[in-house]
Amino acid sequence: MEVSIRDVANRAGVSISTVSRILNNTATVSEKKMLAVKEAMEYYNYEPNQFARGLKKQTSNMIGVYFPGGTDSIFESAYNLELLRGIEKVLAYQNYSMVLISESREFESRKKRTPKYLEFIRQKRIDGLILSGLTSKSAEDNVDVVWKIMEEGYPVVYIGKRLHKNGLNVYAQFEHYNVKMIEVLKNSGHKKVLLQVAKVHNHYLEGIMARVHSEMPDMEVFPHITNSFLDTREHILQDIREYVLHRGCTAICARGMEEAQVLLSVCAELQIKIPEQVSILSVEHKPGAGTLLYPQVSSFYVPAKDMGVGAAELLIDYIENREVNESSIEFETKFIERNSIRRL
Amino acid sequence: MEVSIRDVANRAGVSISTVSRILNNTATVSEKKMLAVKEAMEYYNYEPNQFARGLKKQTSNMIGVYFPGGTDSIFESAYNLELLRGIEKVLAYQNYSMVLISESREFESRKKRTPKYLEFIRQKRIDGLILSGLTSKSAEDNVDVVWKIMEEGYPVVYIGKRLHKNGLNVYAQFEHYNVKMIEVLKNSGHKKVLLQVAKVHNHYLEGIMARVHSEMPDMEVFPHITNSFLDTREHILQDIREYVLHRGCTAICARGMEEAQVLLSVCAELQIKIPEQVSILSVEHKPGAGTLLYPQVSSFYVPAKDMGVGAAELLIDYIENREVNESSIEFETKFIERNSIRRL
DNA sequence: CTGTTAGCGCCTTCAT
DNA sequence: ATGAAGGCGCTAACAG
């Protein structure tokens, strides 16, 4: 059923291979037949069946995107969204499509052994995979599975700290800029600081704290693990009560602009003036996000969209050429000074 | 290359048809062979090639999601994100995957005639399509193309105002709740109101204004078209200067919580007190979003995630049963009173 | 330059 | 209950 290459060939009075050749312009074809075929294709609104094509070429022109940590959280943070934007942009440009891979119910309940993305790879549904938010530790993520496919040479790029000698990778020095944040506050005269850390970044914390201790021994940093941002309002209220009002923190590092925004609201509600009474330093994943708040929030800019672009470019380059110049890209973060930090 | 059904059959000492039968459990197979085949599948980590399977069955288990208006804007608003969340949730549950369809560069430059989603449909890459943000007018969206495939019985659901007698559809009465917003403000004693409308909703404006005029003739509503939200800060500043400070508007309807947030910031900057000097009423697509601001923003709750869920369920139901009880679902919006509206 | 043909991996009658 | 064989639509040799 449906229209196939054969119909087009018949109507154009040529053989199917001629049609195929035109489709893939894999050889020169006489003007006359060319036109006839084009006419027939238009006539039928012909589009080559991707199953058949894929069966032959074993390539789908689809890229899988997988964020461990559950389907709901993908669309949660500006960071992820910017990543997706970047990825999307280059995929569209290169004529690939993006498949969002998420676990089915079976996985969540019965602890199926194979993560969905592996299934997709084996089924040839995707030509490559982009991962974000892998952590070296968590067994849930089946990290070893990822290493394995990477070692087999399957096209994978993961976004986040480099965890393995193989594989393509894109990173923004999370640990490093977190330490830098503390440094900025230190240089403004702060001594006691509250540091928000996302649950998924939990495992970085130790390293960050260690570096702070050794490099800035006079700084007192209180880490606080944050969950997804909507339920944090009350937590933030409590945090401010405890760390700012009670323990005397003079500054807060927010993990993203969403949190900074809530911080500002809560402070406004408590009539705590910013930056007079508390300084706020945030991370900005979308350029200019900090200017939308009042007061405008000083931040470390993490070029999430660029990272997405980088990841996708790296991946496609690898898919199409099977060789890459760099296997890892580190993105620079940049401090943007605005009005939310007070010099003590 | 790779492992195919043949390898599994060989190792298990059976024919490929037996393996196929087990794969699809389309007939009973002796216990013994069953076990042998299972063993072989495990051994090889076998996953059936989707191209071959699709070639036979003409189904991909992928659902296309398409938002006209450019790739970048997809991840822009909380509305879209909530829709995506809802869609994603039911697709994952039903073992479908989501393909983000966006136009390639050719489309944007050379004005190719076929929208990408049509290509995908013809190529059999997707089993169904979810559209959002269609407008009846704009020729760019190739709406007629959409109607055509809907009339052919292809599984499509579009999110937004019902525009055609055929096709599956999910809607939240945009016009209606916009009028309601004005009404709420009227009932609080406001007379002059600034109404933000997104560019994509431009075409609704006329209807809204007409209804306001006839139902609430004493209300003076100033519509203002808003673009994507990041560049609106200065616009909003100007708006407030012009409409609030100059023309004496006492209330603003924000088109989403992102805009409300910027409004609050700008007002704080201008030392305009909310709700004492200006009232703000917003639309809330994510439950509780209004509680994160200060003051907490009164809003109309539009259940975007539920809409996504509804859309996906409708679609899959149609795909799998080819018959649906309802062809259109209307979602109720709900007014949530908080602290951003002053009674005059 | 063009047509014929052999698969790609799987499902599905049709025999047995 | 099981195997053999044809064909889904397309591409890529191969032969002219």
Image: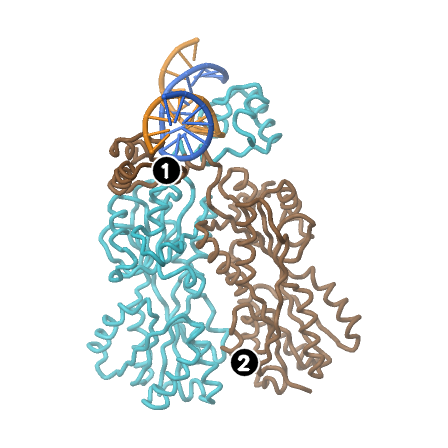
Chain colours: A brown, B cyan, C orange, D blue
Q: Is residue B314 left or right of residue A32?
A: right
Q: Nearer the viewer, mark 2 or mark 1?
A: 1
Q: CA distance from mark 2 to mark 1?
A: 61 Å
- Which residue is disc 2 drawn over? A296
Q: Position of residue B221 (x, y in %)?
A: 28, 81
Q: Is residue A118 above or below residue B27?
A: below
Q: Are marks 2 and 1 on the same chain?
A: yes
Residue in front for this viewpoint, B107 or A321? A321
B49 versus B248 height, above or below = above
At 47% from the left edge and 51% from the top edge, which residue is drawn? A98
Q: Residue B152 sits in which quadrant?
A: top left
Q: Amino acid at mark 1?
A: Thr
Residue on which disc 1 sits: A28
Instruction: State the image coordinates of residue A195 (x, y, percent, origin top left).
Output: 67, 72
Residue at (49, 51) in percent of width and height: A100
Front one among A281 and B25: A281
Most foreground residue, A95 or B123: A95
Residue B332 quadrant: bottom left
Please report, as a chain letter, where disc 1 is located. A
Point out residue A340 in the picture as x, y percentages from the top left corner.
59, 82
Discs 2, 1 touching: Cβ within 8 Å: no
Residue at disc 2, secondary structure? loop
Where is residue B28? Give x, y as percent. 48, 22
For the N terminus of chain B, the quadrant is top right
Residue positioned most to the left: B214
Please state which of residues A286 and A313 is positioned toward the viewer in this rendering: A313
